[in-house]
Image: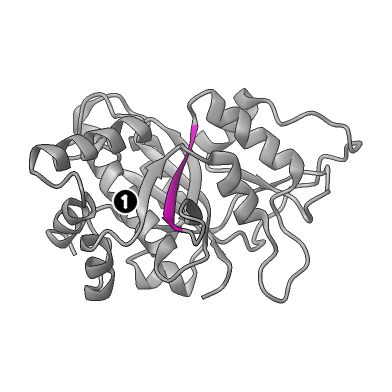
């Protein structure tokens, strides 16, 4: 498995870059959130690049929250509790891992400026991470997988994910899907299709259709969010905590992954 897998950012539509000195501050949170609410997101050409490109894909990848493909092997990994899963415990470390260059590549689209921008969003409660931890030889724990993204209303826009151990990124994504369903979300945006995401149930739609789903996800009415959705969607950390609480009430505190596998098996 590659060191990390991006909710892929391959150029389809570019605007002109915002040329800037290396000391330019992070993107303003209001501008960044407006872009996401409009179906647009930023990227850079390299880690130390101060320039920002705004991208609006013609074809969008989404992962239907009721269509996650849970393989038998992944279900076993979840049930056995191979990894300890947390939410927002190591946002910056997840971004650092996602920014590490892929095998055979020397640059990352996650520039320092972009990382600073999303860390600000995280501090404001608009960006979140899921982390997977495994035992380390020194008796502690090490970060072996995770993902991060931007959340608003009933939408979650996945940015990047990484894996340093077998199935770690898949476990993180499984927890994300379960938590988003728990919290009443309706859209999980993957931005661009990859073979990895396709194997997990992601599908491609037109940008026009995506914008329609995005508008519905920002509508306050229960009807627009779909049958069974919460009137007030939960932020990812609260939805994650709700899952842990339910696992505890069912006697699964030592292995909450069993609850996740059970939830996802019902719709796989």
Q: Disc 1 designates what residue?
A: 175
x, y percent for residue 115: 67, 41
x, y percent for residue 120: 62, 28
For numbered disc 1, what is the local secondary structure?
A: helix
Vertical side of 180 occupied by 142: above or below = below
Residue range of the region highlighted in magenta in the rendering: 127-135
Q: Residue at x 56, y 48 (%)?
A: 94
| Relative side of 185 to 53, left or right | left
The quarter of the displayed image where residue 118 is located = top right
Check disc 1: other Cα within 10 Å, few if <14, some if 14-19, many if 20+: many
Residue 1 visible in image: yes
The chief SS type of the magenta part is strand
| Relative side of 80 to 199, left or right | left
x, y percent for residue 232: 26, 24
Q: What colouring style does the render use?
A: one colour
| Relative side of 107 to 189, left or right | right
The number of callouts visible is 1
Reply yes or no: does residue 126 show up in magenta: no
Residue furthest to the right in view is 21
Quarter of the image for the C terminus: give it. Answer: bottom left
């Amino acid at each position: 498995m590659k060191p990390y897998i991006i909710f892929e950012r391959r150029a389809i539509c570019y605007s002109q870059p915002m040329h800037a000195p290396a000391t330019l501050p992070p993107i303003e949170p209001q501008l960044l959130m407006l872009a996401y609410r409009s179906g647009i997101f930023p990227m850079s050409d390299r880690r130390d690049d101060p320039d920002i490109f705004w991208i609006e894909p013609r074809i969008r990848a989404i992962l239907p929250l009721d269509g996650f493909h849970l393989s038998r092997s992944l279900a076993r990994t979840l049930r056995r509790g191979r990894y300890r899963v947390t939410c927002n415990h190591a946002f910056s470390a997840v971004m650092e891992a996602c920014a590490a260059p892929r095998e055979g590549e020397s640059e990352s689209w996650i520039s320092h400026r972009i990382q600073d921008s999303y860390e600000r969003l995280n501090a404001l409660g608009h960006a979140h991470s899921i982390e997977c931890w495994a035992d380390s030889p020194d008796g502690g724990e090490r970060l072996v997988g995770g993902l991060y993204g931007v959340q608003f209303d009933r939408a979650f826009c996945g940015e990047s994910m990484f894996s340093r151990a077998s199935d770690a990124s898949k476990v993180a994504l499984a927890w994300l899907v379960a938590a988003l369903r728990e919290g009443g979300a309706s859209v999980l945006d993957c931005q661009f299709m990859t073979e990895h995401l396709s194997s997990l149930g992601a599908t491609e739609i037109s940008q026009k259709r995506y914008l329609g789903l995005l508008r519905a996800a920002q509508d306050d009415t229960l009807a627009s969010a779909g049958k069974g959705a919460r009137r007030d969607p939960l932020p990812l950390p609260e939805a994650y905590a709700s899952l842990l609480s339910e696992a505890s009430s069912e006697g699964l505190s030592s292995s909450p992954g069993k609850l996740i596998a059970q939830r996802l098996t019902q719709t796989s």
